[in-house]
Image (cartoon, rainbow, N blue to C red):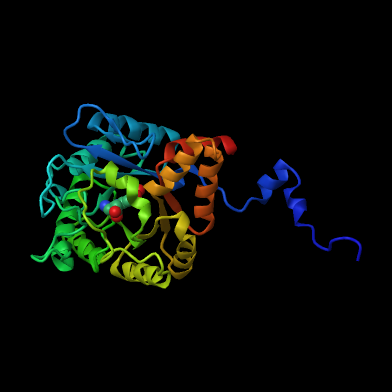
Amino acid sequence: MSFPAHRPRRLRSAPAMRRLARETWPVPSQLVLPMFVREGISEAVPISSMPGVMQHTLDSLKRAAADAAAAGVGGVMLFGVPAVRDAEGSGADDPNGILNVATRALIEEVGDALVVQTDLCLDEFTDHGHCGVLTASGAVDNDRTLERYAAMGLAQAEAGSHLLGLSGMMDGQVLAVRAALEGAGFTDTVIMAYSAKYAGAFYGPFREAVDSQLVGDRRTYQLDPANGREGVREALLDVEEGADIVMVKPALPYLDVLADVRAAVDVPVWAYQVSGEYAMVEAAAAQGWIDRRRAVLESITSIRRAGADAVLTYWAIEAAQWLREEL
Ligand code: PBG
């Protein structure tokens, strides 16, 4: 035989052909922008480890959310940075707590254009920085934390949040929050569970973003990066408990878990391209070592290809604009 029997290159021969042959097209509405709002500041504060990302004031938050809506982004995920913290994370379910105040403001500002989402976890609100309340000996108390999550979920639903992002990795958290919502008549509030959330190094810059007080680590509740099957098991349990959407986090180092979860469940699967993933590309791009735009779009496309229906990414607004141009 003097010629190749198969020539896959035919489908790559020209831009128009490549466009037609392309399997995965992320669109702006599949992107969710995580945002930080900080209590008691009069001007937005840049986060040094996440160039371009801010701790917002209420006003700058509203403006940035309007930009996201204009870019066609699908939603925003809100994180609160309170001025005062305590052992129980009281600011989390206080209707006047920063996250709940900001939620009401965004619902009013962009509630029709965007899915307004809230992080449901205690770590931003506790003075010890853990995702739950502690026992006398300092361990994270799973079941007492569930009561706090239920109260937090109700406060967020009352503030108008469309979607609660349960990121605390406590056992039974989806069931506890779902029961509280149903009991109070919040039957339309969506629960998105951070089901396969790994305890790794990639959340580093986020700790600066929320002024985290954490000493130690989260290894008694977040997953061991070595365990893929356990991630699938967590996702299946969350679906059983009533999660509407499940999430894998971080994204790029866990594409195998993402693909496995995608195959195991029939609810939407989301992925979170976390602060460390953002910082790596920004740092390399700032050195001129990597093409920023291509790296961002390639990573988002890969996360979609691996099975994510939507992607939380700090690049959401810029990526949405780029994706428009690519189309
Ligand atoms: C917990 C939470 C964290 C992130 C999102 N939700 C921090 C953690 O688990 O340590 C990290 C997001 C990121 O790194 O971009 N409330």
* Foreground residue among 106 and 248: 248
Q: Residue furthest right?
A: 2
Residue located at (20% from left, 27% from top): 42
Horizontal relation, residue 93 to residue 117: left or right: left
165 in relation to 97, above or below? below
Decide if residue 320 is in sight here. Answer: no
Count up the numbered dots: 0
Horizontal relation, residue 324 to residue 188: left or right: right
Residue 80 point in image, percent of width and height:
23, 43
* Foreground residue among 189 and 65: 65
* Foreground residue among 214 and 271: 214
Residue 141 point in image, percent of width and height:
15, 66
Q: Picture quarter containing residue 69?
A: top left
Q: Residue furthest top?
A: 42
Q: Residue furthest left?
A: 136
Horizontal relation, residue 192 to residue 104: left or right: right
Residue 9 point in image, percent of width and height:
76, 53
Q: Picture quarter containing residue 43?
A: top left
Quarter the C terminus occupies: top right
Residue 257 point in image, percent of width and height:
45, 65
